[in-house]
Image (cartoon, rainbow, N blue to C red):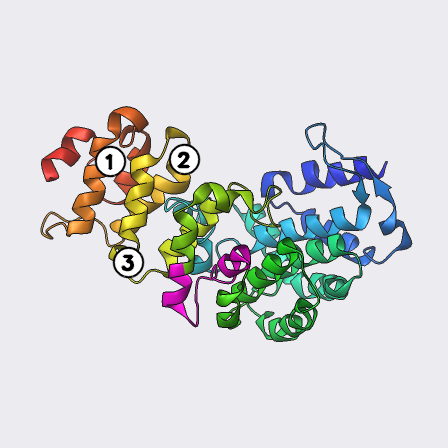
């Protein structure tokens, strides 16, 4: 029954991240029962395709609150949104097209975030590392929200106090990511002996030590197979291959495309057709962030990137499968048009 109830929350109240008028009341109820003793009861996966081990109800409820908070936050901070591995430029136009019921549901979910944060915070210091991870996954979007950022330093202090006693890569990396997403100074963690921690400490859209953070991210992108292997189970809030998030953060932090061009062009050259929207497209859009204009000559980095798309067109469908990104950048949408620019 517990598994079925969690499944109903996922499918009926937050289906694929969509917010409904029932979502906010359901979230308040979930937050109110987080500390109930039944939360420690374990249950099997609630979907047939989820073959993970049995886990406590509290973990699933915290994870659900985190998903709700992520959905409620989308569109609030464009700079942060652009570091999300699934962001696309045409999403911003769609965000302005909510119908009245969708807007009411969105605002209701944003209004309850202080109450949800109150319920989640105690579990950041749970003795169970799995509960701590789920709570942190919910706290990251909650404490990034306008009106709640003043709570982030207190939560960051709690996490910092625990960090010295934590040895597991996954938890240390999760803490580093939380700190940087909340705008905390993670410069010290950019020198951590564990590369996954260094990278997570560099993921924020704003960074105190920007050049070193970009260098850390680019190093990880030079060895994407190793980078993807750090987290066989994605960190909370980071679905998809980890390198996708690393790339988006590097593109967002870079002051110019030239700063990331060698690594970015190598990705396009070796990329396959399955990663259009998560690698090649975002790289192209960053290279032409101001949009292509015939009156502006191509820079050498832009020219090299377009040449890489042309050279790999037959093996990767490098232009044909990226046409929406070429359109968003103001570029021709076919091989012939790009070749004419070169």
- Within-10-Å neighbours for mark 2: few <14, some 14–19, many 20+: some
Question: Which contiguous range is marked in magenta?
Answer: 194-215
Judge left or right: residue 181 versus residue 155: left
Specify the label residue 275 is tagged with: 2
Q: Secondary structure at mark 2?
A: helix
Q: Secondary structure at mark 3?
A: helix
Q: Is residue 210 magenta?
A: yes
Compute the Cα span from label 2 to label 3. Answer: 22 Å
Compute the Cα span from label 2 to label 1. Answer: 14 Å
Q: Which residue is mark 1?
A: 309
Judge left or right: residue 324 versus residue 148: left
Earlier along the polypeptide chain: callout 2 or callout 3?
A: 3
Q: Which residue is mark 3?
A: 259
Q: Does residue 186 appear anywhere in the picture?
A: yes
Where, quadrant-wise, is the N terminus in this rendering? top right
Earlier along the polypeptide chain: callout 2 or callout 1?
A: 2
| Residues at circles 2 and 1 in contact by the CB criterion of under 8 Å | no
């Amino acid at each position: 029954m517990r598994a079925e109830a969690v499944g109903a929350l996922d499918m009926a109240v937050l289906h694929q991240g969509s917010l409904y008028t029932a979502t906010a009341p359901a979230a308040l109820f979930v937050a109110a029962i987080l500390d109930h003793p039944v939360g420690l009861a374990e249950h099997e996966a609630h979907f047939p395709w989820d073959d993970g081990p049995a886990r406590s109800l509290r973990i699933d409820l915290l994870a659900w609150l985190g998903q709700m908070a992520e959905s409620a936050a989308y569109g609030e901070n464009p700079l942060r949104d652009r570091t999300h591995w699934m962001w696309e430029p045409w999403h911003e136009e769609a965000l302005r097209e909510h119908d009245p019921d969708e807007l009411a549901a969105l605002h209701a979910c944003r209004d309850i975030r202080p109450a949800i944060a109150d319920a989640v915070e105690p579990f950041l210091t749970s003795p169970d590392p799995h509960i701590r991870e789920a709570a942190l996954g919910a706290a990251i979007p909650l404490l990034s929200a306008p009106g709640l950022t003043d709570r982030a330093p207190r939560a960051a202090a709690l996490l910092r106090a625990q960090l010295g006693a934590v040895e597991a890569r996954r938890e240390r990396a999760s803490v580093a990511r939380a700190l940087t997403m909340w705008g905390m100074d993670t410069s010290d963690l950019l020198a951590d002996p564990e590369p996954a921690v260094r990278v997570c400490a560099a993921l924020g859209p704003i960074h105190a030590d920007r050049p070193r953070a970009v260098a850390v991210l680019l190093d990880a992108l030079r060895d994407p197979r190793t980078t993807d292997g750090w987290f066989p189970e994605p960190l909370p809030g980071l679905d998809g291959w980890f390198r996708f998030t690393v790339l988006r953060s590097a593109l967002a932090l870079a002051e110019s495309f030239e700063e990331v061009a060698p690594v970015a062009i190598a990705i396009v050259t070796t990329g396959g057709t399955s990663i259009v929207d998560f690698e090649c497209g975002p790289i192209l859009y960053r290279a032409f962030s101001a949009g292509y204009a015939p009156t502006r000559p191509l820079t050498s980095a832009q020219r090299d990137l377009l040449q890489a798309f042309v050279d790999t067109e037959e093996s990767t469908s490098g232009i044909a499968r990226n046409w929406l990104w070429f359109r968003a950048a103001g570029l021709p949408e076919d091989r012939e048009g790009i070749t004419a620019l070169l």
